Image (spheres, rainbow, N blue to C red):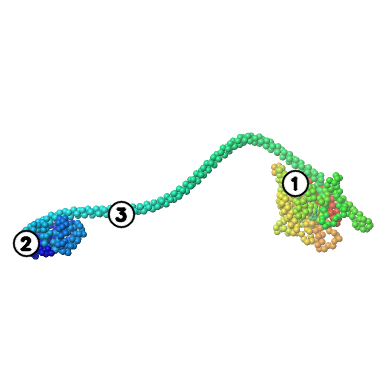
Amino acid sequence: MNMQAQRPPLLEVKRNFELKTTLVKASSRLPLPGSKLKRGPEQMEDALEPAKKRTRGLGAVTKIDTSRPRGPVLSTVSQTQGPTAAQKGPKKTGPRGCATVASVLKNPKAAPAAPAAPAQKPGTSAAPMVAGKRPGKRPAWDLKGQLCDLNEELKRYREKTQKLDQENQGLREQLKEAQEQATVLGTERNTLAGELASVQTQAEQSQQKLETLCARVLELEECLGTKERLVQELQKEKLELQEEQKALATRLEEQERRLQASETALSSSEAEVVSLRQKAAAQVTLLAEQGDRLHGLEMERRRLHNQLQELKGNIRVFCRVRPVLAGEPTPSPGFLLFPHGPAGPSDPPTHLSVSRSDDRRATLTGAPAPTTRHDFSFDRVFPPGSKQEEVFEEISMLVQSALDGYPVCIFAYGQTGSGKTFTMEGGPGGDPQLEGLIPRALRHLFSVAQEMGGQGWTYSFVASYVEIYNETVRDLLATGTRKGQGGECEIRRAGPGSEELTVTNARYVPVSCEKEVEALLHLARQNRAVARTAQNERSSRSHSVFQLQISGEHAARGLQCGAPLNLIDLAGSERLDPGLALGPGERDRLRETQAINSSLSTLGLVIMALSNKESHVPYRNSKLTYLLQNSLGGSAKMLMFVNISPLEENVSESLNSLRFASKVNQCVIGTAQANKK
Ligand code: ADP
Ligand code: MG
């Protein structure tokens, strides 16, 4: 409002306006960063030039308006004019000036530009702004004075401008520096950010490592605990071991002491051993001598034994009378008598008397039937009641002869039911007391063979068991499909030119103990039972031949001996009653009986021929004698049991048997020779 009051005339205003425009124009260039002053003070003079310059200036006003907010200019003004002037300035300006003030306020460094204020509002007098420095207003007409003032003012402005330029320059440099610094700091910041990131990564890694390490530490602590326990245990163990070591050391010392003692004893023992060895060597020599002597004695024993047997007779006959069985009629007293020998009752009986009454003569005369007494004498007579053991004792010497290498044949002869099977195999029920000759003879052989083992003899035994029925040979030891079939066997020579006989299809079983023999006898009984028929007790009608081939060897002396032991249960010797009617069964029976009688008489004939030393011995006349030819005659020894029934009803058959046996008993077969190889 003041400005309007002081407003000069239009022309002045116009000039002022032009001036201000120029001024503003000049000053407006200052704040531009990087801009240079294009005109010096002289050039400013040109600004006062009218017309076209004015026109140019007007154009520049618009330019100034837009560039007003430039800070450095305002800053400079504030510095020069102080806060009071600066505060006053805005009050005189219009809305445009307010904008400038606002921009200045925003930037404390940019003080409101007092000189610019007039430029913002054309026509406003500049006088108040320099009122303090001018002595007073010049009258309007004092143009020259005004011009002077203006020039002075211009001068001052120029100085200010210079100062401001310098300051601006300084500030630019500062800014540049600050920018550079900012760039450096930015770079540094980036670097630091990068470093920070890497440090963080490292920190994370370290954290992870730390966690891993913590886990590891825990693990190790646990492990340490275990190890510590282990160490404790080991220490405990160590202590125990130390104690044990001590004990062992003590024992070791003791053992060493004992060892020393033992060594001493050993050295003395060694000396003793040397002397004992010498003694043993002497004993060995002595033993060898004694062995030789023993062998000589054994040979002598065999010779004497054989001589004894020969003195007793190479053919011996024993008579055995079986006891009366339960249910059988008791024979009349005196029917059978067993007179004792000359040495009295203790002398074993060798005689038998059979008294037979002639009933026919008694009937005719009416007188008591006369009795005929038949006396028989044998090598030994066994009355009823004689035990199996006693019987065996008598034949054990013969069994010994078989071991010594002499063939032995033991026959059981007699009518059916007289006790042949009982004598050879034994009684029923497996009672050991009732065991017959076969099991007893084999047991004896096994035990003697074992004893002879001590003298260097080794024995082996092979058994066979066949029956001869109706002149056919059948194996009693057959097993499996051949069992009971009675597959025919043939008697053949063991080889061309061989004296030895063998039965084809028959089993030859090596035996070495009683049990094996028992099994064989059991098997033979089974085979006989299978062959039995209703009409015919076949075992009574056939000869059973148990053969045991004995082989002995004295390896050290290169001696061998071998001989068969034959135990024969002959078929019943009874004859058929000629008065009996011959039915179909009887006809068969007759044929059987004829075969039996034929073979038994052949046996008698063979014995006779051998006894009479006939050139021809009819071995081939029967299968039995053919099979036994190597065990009859010559070096062989023969024993015949004649089994007698104690019953009176059997007296006829008994007498027949006794007569046959007596004939055999009278035979003497030449000196037997042992089968020594
Ligand atoms: P063989 O074989 O001669 O036909 P056995 O041996 O079968 O006769 O005997 C006929 C019966 O007489 C059988 O029951 C048998 O047990 C019995 N026996 C035979 N001899 C004696 C004896 N010495 N002691 C007791 N019983 C006997
Ligand atoms: Mg019999």
Q: Give the quarter the ligand 2 occupies.
A: bottom right
Q: Which mark is residue 193?
A: 3
Nearer the camera: disc 3 or disc 1: 3
Earlier sequence position, callout 3 versus callout 2: 2
Q: Check disc 1 and report its element: helix, strand or loop.
A: helix
Measured from the top left, where is residue 509 in percent x and y?
A: 71, 52
Q: Is 521 left or right of 352, judged from the image as shown?
A: left
Q: Which mark is residue 140?
A: 2
In the rendered image, which residue does mark 1 sit on? 403
Nearer the camera: disc 1 or disc 2: 2
- The residue at the point 81 percent across, 46 percent down is 313
Earlier sequence position, callout 3 versus callout 1: 3
Measured from the top left, where is residue 421 in percent x and y?
A: 78, 54
Q: Amino acid at mark 1?
A: Leu
Measured from the top left, where is residue 182 in percent x and y?
A: 25, 54
Q: Amino acid at mark 2?
A: Ala
- The residue at the point 91 percent across, 55 percent down is 369
Whether residue 77 is visible here, answered yes or no, is no
Q: Amino acid at mark 3?
A: Ala
Q: Residues within 10 Å of mark 3 (few under 14, many from 20)?
A: few
Alpha carbon separation for disc pair 1 and 2: 194 Å
**Quadrant assignment for the C terminus:** top right
Could you tell me if the residues under marks 1 and 2 are in contact, i.e. CB atoms within 8 Å? no
Q: Please determine whether, in this image, residue 136 is positioned above or below residue 252.
A: below
Whether residue 326 is visible here, answered yes or no, is yes
